Amino acid sequence: MNNFFDCVKTRKTPVSDVVTHHRMLSICHAINIALRLGRKLVFDPNTDTFVGDNEANTFVSREQRKGYEITT
């Protein structure tokens, strides 16, 4: 927590920043999808999709519940 409060004061990047966590969790999800499908996959971290694999890409996101949609 001290690192967080220091970063709020100094505007420095925290030790545990959101971009790093997103990358790490994306890879974890990609590994789980590959295990579920039982085959090797090629994951593009820039687009967060699997290259040339529509079936694997169906696991990347799901339909959002009405009233809780996230728009970007």
Image (cartoon, rainbow, N blue to C red):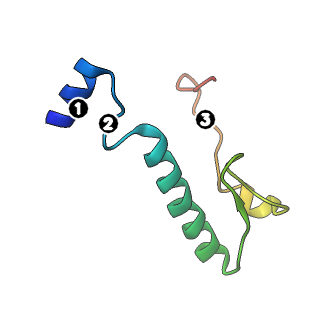
For the N terminus, the image quarter is top left
| Residue 1 seen in the figure | no
- Give the answer, above or below, for where 13 lies relative to 61: above
Question: Which residue type does callout 3 highlight?
Answer: Gln
Q: Quadrant of residue 27?
A: bottom right
**Residue 54 or residue 40, whichever sits in front:** 40
Residue at disc 3, secondary structure: loop
Relative to residue 20, is residue 54 drawn left or right? Answer: right
Relative to residue 55, is residue 19 drawn left or right? Answer: left
Please give the name of the residue rendered at 67% of the width and 75% of the height, measured from the top-left corner. 37
Give the labeled residue for mark 3. 64
Label 1, label 2: how far apart the Cα atoms are: 6 Å
Residue 42: percent from left, percent from top = 73, 67
Q: Marks 1 and 2: CB-CB under 8 Å?
A: yes
Question: Which residue type does callout 2 highlight?
Answer: Pro
| Residue 55 seen in the figure | yes
Label 3, label 1: how far apart the Cα atoms are: 31 Å
User: How crowded is the residue under tag 2: few (<14 C-alpha within 10 Å), some, or many (20+)?
Assistant: few
Residue 36: percent from left, percent from top = 60, 73
Residue 3: percent from left, percent from top = 20, 36
* Marks 3 and 1, the one that precedes in the sequence: 1
**Residue 69 or residue 1, whichever sits in front:** 1
Please give the name of the residue rendered at 59% of the width and 76% of the height, measured from the top-left corner. 35
Residue at disc 2, secondary structure: loop
Q: Nearer the viewer's eye, disc 3 or disc 1?
A: 1
Give the labeled residue for mark 2. 14
